[in-house]
Image: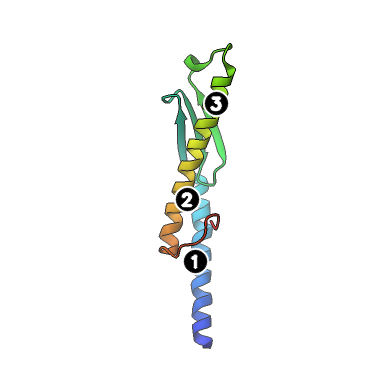
Amino acid sequence: MGMNMQKLMQQAQKMQAKMASMQEELAQRTVDGTAGGGMVKATVNGQRDLLGITIDPEVIDPDDIEMLEDLIVAAVNDAMRAATEMAAAEMQKITGGMGLPPGMF
């Protein structure tokens, strides 16, 4: 039984190292989310940090700030979904489909 536990611990350490490496890689990778047909673009990294917002000047209407705010929220949410999907795909590669619960990465 001792050998099995040692082997399990070694596997856990390898997975932990792979996960740390994946987190570093995800911090460097970016994805974009858009809204308004691309008029508003949000860029986030794989750790779901918002890195930037790009707004086409044509969508700026001083009389309708609420629409612009809605487009920004939609673009950020779209980018966050893309980042989550990217992180989940990378986690799937590491865990081999072990089915870890959401938020475990």
Instruction: Establish if 9 lies above or below 38.
Output: below
Mark 3 burial class by Cα count in 10 Å: few <14, some 14-19, many 20+: few
Label whose residue precedes the other's in the sequence (1 or 2)? 1
Q: What residue type is labelled 1?
A: Met
Mark 2 burial class by Cα count in 10 Å: few <14, some 14-19, many 20+: many
Where disc 3 sits, the SS reads: helix
Label whose residue precedes the other's in the sequence (3 or 2)? 3
Q: Which amino acid does label 3 sit on?
A: Asp
Q: Mark 1 points at which residue?
A: 15
Q: Do the residues labelled 3 and 2 touch (CB within 8 Å)?
A: no
Q: Mark 3 points at which residue?
A: 70
Instruction: Establish if 9 lies above or below 16.
Output: below
Cα distance between the residues tagged 1 and 2: 15 Å
Closer-to-camera residue (13/62): 62
Q: Mark 2 points at which residue?
A: 87
Viewer-nearest of labels 3 and 2? 3
Q: Which residue is drawn at 47% across and 50% down?
A: 87
